[in-house]
Amino acid sequence: MTKPSAAAPAVDLADEAAYLEAVAQARKAADAYYGSGESGLDDETYDRLLRAITVWEDAHPGRIAADSPSQQVAAGVTAGDVEHTVPMLSLGNVFSDEELTAWAVSLERRLGGAAVAGWAVEPKLDGVALAARYREGRLVQLVTRGDGTTGEDVSHAIGDIIGLPMILTEPVTIEVRGEVLMTEDQFAGANELRTAHGATAFANRRNASSGSLRAKDRAYRIEQTFLAYAALTDPEHTDDPTLAGLTHTRLIARLAALGLGTMADTPLATRTYTSLDQVMDRVREIGALRAELDIELDGAVIKADSPVDQIRAGMGSRTPHWATAFKFPAAQKITVLRAVEWSVGRTGVIAPRAVLDPVDVAGTTITYATLHNPADIARRGLMLGDHVIVYRAGEVIPRVEGAVAGLRTGTEQPIDFPELCPRCGSGIDRSQERWRCARGRACGRKEAIRYAVARDALDIDGLGEKIIVQLVDKGLIEDFADLFTLTRDQLLLLDRMGAKSADNLMTAIKAAKTKPLNRVFCALGVLGTGRSMSLRIAAHFGSMQAIRDADAVALEQVNGIGGEKAPVIVEELADLAPVIDKLVAAGVNMNQPDFVPSTPTDAGADAETSAQKAKSELPLAGMTVVVTGAMTGPLSDRSRTEMTELIAKAGGRASSSVSARTHLVVAGENAGSKLDKAQAFGIETITPEELAQRLAGHLT
Ligand SMILES: NC(=O)c1ccc[n+]([C@@H]2O[C@H](COP(=O)([O-])OP(=O)(O)OC[C@H]3O[C@@H](n4cnc5c(N)ncnc54)[C@H](O)[C@@H]3O)[C@@H](O)[C@H]2O)c1
Ligand SMILES: [Zn+2]
């Protein structure tokens, strides 16, 4: 689980000379970071430096360097010409529960010893601060934070930012403040446009946001997202007198009602608590959600919820006294891209992977990271030897964001893309962004057969890799369908295959013929369909014939199959037709047991067949269920696939990830982040034993 933890300890500055050197180094980084947007230091390194600087400054208040970056918002780098009559401040930060408690104590001291009326907790969005000015409900001006007192006018971006509508739902005059950021798709889109116009790709999303916002007179428009976290509520800035009396939480709800982008109605919504223990729990919940979000967070923000407390606490020169950030371990680090490896999957897809100088990201050493496909590498403009930003939050696979172009030395080398399939040397099909060996699945024949007979698919015991390799090399089988027509005599031709093993294997293969359709379909290894998707498809269509008859539109009726996946599945099935025909001819089962069609065919639209009625009375009817951790009790030896099948039999739908749409989480031993997340969403959580009880009639 992602646990907010203490930051790396600050280095001790020995003397004033060391202090001045640290100031110079931090100044250089801050100038680059807030200026061009590209610093050679990652945030963790910068923050450690800044902490050392402030520790020294606290001990020597009379000797603070005039250009110390600790003294101003954004180190005073980017002033503009639009005044912020109410300054746009930064946030102080804490890295541990102890530091949070100490901060809360100091805040209550400012309130004259009174307890804070309530705490609002929300995510700290990792983007760029922006003020949006609406006059009588119409968006008239966008201003960056700048140095906090003046910012740059970036009104040219009006119309490009989702969450900042041109017209509000009511004609109010108001200045809204929030963060501009990019989703993964928006980031890819921005890089695509930028590289197409001959510019270098952005090093990361925050950079892309800041750069895109500030670039004027560009020939193309870049879409971004705005999420509000504040508004100016004093009479000088708004004509709605009710706003000033709202708590922070209610203010955000009000901004959402005006049509502005906020996190309201998402699991990240601002929530209010009375005790610090609850606040700390919520901070951890937000940390646990971080891995699966499409936006980046670098912490949680804790605010005094009541406007009375906020005004009494007041603001410092750089940060408000009534709010602070609980920072999460940095998810981005800078390291060097050494090589790109290309591997071929069982379906013939050729995928690149980045080899990095080992780097610690939030407590895990990273040496490899995903690069999605060759087009993705091109879009990010990467070169070998580049300093790249790698990103990893929670359990997600680390990814390469982009290169820090400012650190290039001229010795970087272009990345070699394969000319031929790295496994078999055939040509490459480049018709899609995802490259594939021209031989397609034939290239990954042995891997595909191993996949088909594995435990989650046909589960054929005794058919290990060595046997598969021999069977293919001796020309006895081309695909897994040929297994069903193998003879005992053919098996006996194999090295070290005795009569007894051959008999056992023949029995295991024969048993596989009666597996349910979802297992058979899974064994086909259709791109984009794993074990749980196979079960959904089988449960939806009921027979292989019905699946083969389905077009893309019909496939999209299956939960989880979107407009991109459906045509791929149709194409794959056409490709696999000879294999399926062989399976049918060999007498392999092609039906899903207990199949209930989801739409009545002959009966009227609202008539319920008795079979459907029976279905709606099942113990998990209509529920989305996530199983995590090790199963215990009566369910202890069930594999994940068997659990998925059991859930489906009881009327539910198994899913591998917890979301707001999850109804039930079955948490076994050592359940990790999925359990944390379920608790964050307030989803019902039960043990494997409790599930076994609920499904008592369905266990056999
Ligand atoms: N790598 C470098 O060289 C370098 C140099 C300078 C600064 N930095 C990084 O910049 C950061 C410090 O920058 P900063 O002073 O601009 O502050 P900050 O970004 O850490 O925090 C303040 C900002 O948080 C934003 N924010 C997000 N969610 C919010 C919410 N819910 N409520 C209120 N505000 C919210 C606001 O834009 C606010 O201005 C640090 O992370 C530091 O590492 C890095
Ligand atoms: Zn190949």
Image (cartoon, rainbow, N blue to C red):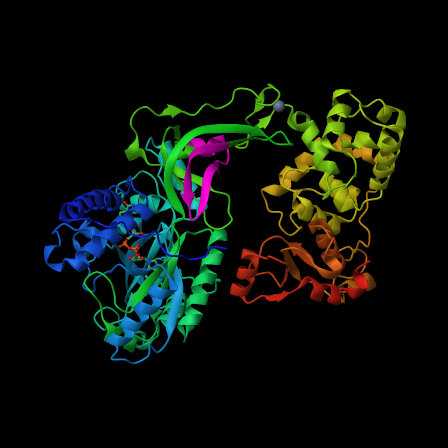
Question: Which secondary structure type mostly characterizes the magenta part of the structure?
Answer: strand
Magenta stretch, residue numbers: 353-378
Residue 197 image position (x, y, % from top left): 34, 32
Q: Is residue 621 visible?
A: no
Taking 153 as reference, is 529 left or right?
right
Taking 452 as reference, is 9 left or right?
left
Comparing 504 with 525, the one in front is 504
Residue furthest out toward the front: 14
Magenta segment: does it hold 370?
yes
Name the quadrant where ligand 1 sits. Answer: bottom left
Taking 37 as reference, is 76 left or right?
left
Q: Residue at x 14, y 45 (%)?
A: 17
Q: Residue at x 53, y 61 (%)?
A: 676
Taking 169 as reference, is 1 left or right?
right
Residue 470 image position (x, y, % from top left): 76, 24
Magenta segment: does it hold 365?
yes
Q: Residue at x 37, y 72 (%)?
A: 119
Which quarter of the figure has residue 205? Answer: top left
Comparing 658 with 239, the one in front is 658
Total labels drawn: 0
Which quarter of the figure has residue 520? Answer: top right
Residue 414 image position (x, y, % from top left): 40, 24
Q: Is residue 179 above or below residue 305?
A: above
Q: Is residue 377 visible?
A: yes
Comparing 80 with 449, the one in front is 449
Position of the C terminus, as image quadrant, is: bottom right
Residue 451 image position (x, y, % from top left): 70, 36
